[in-house]
Image (cartoon, helix red, strand yellow):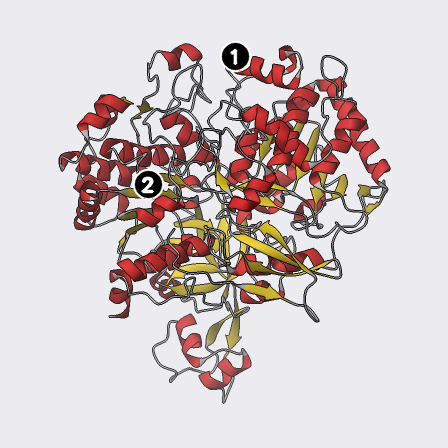
Amino acid sequence: MSWQNERIDMNVYSQGEVDRWVYSTCNLCSIGCGCEIAVKDEKIVGIRGNGKHPINRGRLGPKGENQWQANNSPDRLLSPLIRNELGELVPASWDEAMNLIVSKMKEALNDKGPNSISVYSTGQAFLEDYYTIAKIGRAGLGTHLLDANTRLCTATTEFCLLQSFGADGTPASYDDVDETETLMLFGHNVAETGTVLHERIMDRKARTGKPYIIAVDPRKTLTVRGADLHLQLRPGTNVPLLNGLLNMILQNGAADEDFIRQHTIGFEEMSGALEEWTAERTSEVTGIPDETLKEAARILSETPSLVSTTLQGAFQSADATTACVAINNIHLVRGLIGKPGSGPLHMAGQPSSSANRTAGGVGTYPAHRNPMNPQHLEEMAKLWNVDVSMLPAGPEKGIEEQLEMIEQDQIDVFWNIGTNPLVSLPNRKRAESALKKVFFIMQDHFLTETSKVADVVLPAAMWGEKTGTMENADRTINLLRKAVEPPEGVRTDLDILLDFAKRMDFRDKDGNPLIRYSAPEEAFEEWKEVSRGRPCDMTGITYDKLEAHNGLRWPVTAERPEGTVRLYEDLKFHTSADYAQSYSKDQFTGRALTHDEYADKKADGRAILHATRYNPPSEQPGGDFPMWLTTGRLVWHWHTRTKTGRSPYLQAAAPHGYAELHEDDAREHGIVEGEVIRITSPRGWIEVPAKIGDAVQRGLIFVPFHFGSWESNQAANDLTADFVDPLSKQPTFKQSACRIEKLRRQHLVASGETLGYIAEQYSMSVDDLLKVNRMETPYGIQIGQQLEVPISVMNAPIQPYTPQRTDFKKTPIEEKDEQ
């Protein structure tokens, strides 16, 4: 455990002492911080960190400290809504709403069959919900169209693990971060997306000087400022960078040849694909100086232990799965996996997106079973007591593929659970047009931008109002207990799903109800049996045990009653054809392989090294769109702000979007800080204030994606391209082409007017007015001269944030920035 002491972070608003504290887990990012919920007069009034929880020892990030405020927001949905003949959403009873849904489902099944129905869920619900979605979806409706916003977030985690190791489940854990000599943060701005984990890393670094941190990011983020080495690469060049580094590692003689020979296959083909990636070639493509590349390769060659983390900078970029497989390759070539302080730690974004993958609510079948393996389908049919013929088989369909199916009139009903796709999907105007065509069911806590296309809205309970489990980024299963009852008229996600199954009268092959459990713990007990003998075996878990141990990492079995810190310590990988979660895909094209193709590899318990070939981004700057656009998150908000936007503190810290551009680009265009500019891509435009500095490279614009109001024209996903990774089908939000357009009015200089007077009229400084007009001095303006004035100048008051609250020595990057 890295933490040396507890520190109880707390945010409570209560008149008098709270009545009770209820055990829970933070429900925002994927780190999995233990917490307790404050209850007063049967109302949630605050939160405090759980000092005994090993992940955070009482610490909470700013989003976590403020998440409870949304529960008490006055605009909570308290009744189902149905769209009437006038196109308005009006209150309805639960019977009216559910009967309408059931009738539309039966109509779709009758007219077009099971795959005319899609269930699109979230990464913020509970494992018990996801397992129920899997069972209802596959054994009840018979549809194979189960996906979630996890496709946008961390689908690449799953697919890179399937390619290399045969099954999902990230090999390393936070305990390995505590022990490693070297930490590579690849496209992972942990200071803003996982603040408590970053504080944990920097707390250790302050005391010991370790780990040596390599940060890979095209931006100078908060995370980069705490690193020892920054690899500031050009957008879309992750694979060239990794290929170059691995080629230099091999040239340095750092390969663990015994490990490669005994525990891997595919080395010859992999190494052959690296030969073109010399230091000079890699530097030319990535823009990183070759001396910097050689230093990074030296560190990676010599370090006795290595943890590599990844997040959206890897997952939402071109060649996402290939880049993450290349990271796996580095660990396998060096033999740095399955031992303390070593292994890839491909992160999750949402608090329980990993649970959705594990429980089968998306993609593959429950407990890491292969939808193309007849034996695995037989196992599920037996566990669920249904005929195997009704279980859908074959490769999964991601959300972008499902939008194509909607456009082709193949899908009639779309059930959207706990997510806001009309802010989070790329090229959202296309998504809006598609989703208008289906009968759209929306299950949420609030009306959102997606309400625009909803035909039925179901009000769902929030964190603190229900019980269940989540799987966080490092395989930790955490428990969340109900603190208060949901508001009257509101139901939990699980209760809604159970009611739906009952109304549809789903039965097993003996005529019994398909779903026999009625409570979360009962659902978990059934799930445990489904997990038995699989990589994610949880048969040794109970709710009480989770609370007593403050979470457990799977697998948890009779042989491993306290869980598993890291996977593959025995160096036996899940790559036998009969056991693997997937037959994998062609590493370049994404074509799903057959059983025989996979079996012919003869991996049989060895990890698979893949050749990682570079495929540049599909869209490149040029012509009318000469600049790169990239998107991302802020420390102050979560996804589309459905919850964090209802916290006064968080909303005040980051009230609106902005466009971050390099000071040289701003100077070239004559743009000043706070000036509202238009960013245009081939798909749309937004108007946001400019934030100027050196955090981004020249030619790159960064826009946070949280802000998606239809009225404000600040939605980053009005701009983003909807290309997807060929393996994970995750959209490449990080690389689109765009241009800057200035929004200006003309001012005709009148007699007696000075530049100072004119600037004052438009609430500008003289310096800014000079910059806008590319003038050197305020003297010499002429009567009748036309000056350009921004149509609007806004503050972009993004409040600074220091994620760590402990003193630590400045890193080389911070010292360099201060010189």
Q: Residues within 10 Å of mark 2 (few under 14, many from 20)?
A: many
Residue drawn at the location 83% of the way across and 32% of the way down = 99
Q: Gap in Å between the C-alphas at discs 2 and 1? A: 38 Å
Location of residue 454 in the rendering, given as x and y in whole percent from the top left corner: 73, 41
* Apparent side of residue 400 relative to residue 243 in the rendered image (left or right): right
Image quadrant where residue 248 sits: top left
Disc 1, SS? helix
Residue lying farthest to the bottom in this orientation: 752
Dot 1 amino acid type: Gln
Is residue 221 visible to the viewer in this orientation of the structure?
no
Where is mark 1, residue-wise?
375
Please report whichever mark, 2 or 1, sits nearer to the chain's N-terminal start. Answer: 2
Disc 2, SS? helix
Where is mark 2, residue-wise?
238
Location of residue 373 in the rendering, given as x and y in whole percent from the top left corner: 50, 14
Location of residue 104 in the rendering, given as x and y in whole percent from the top left corner: 78, 28
> Which of label 2 and label 1 is nearer to you?
1
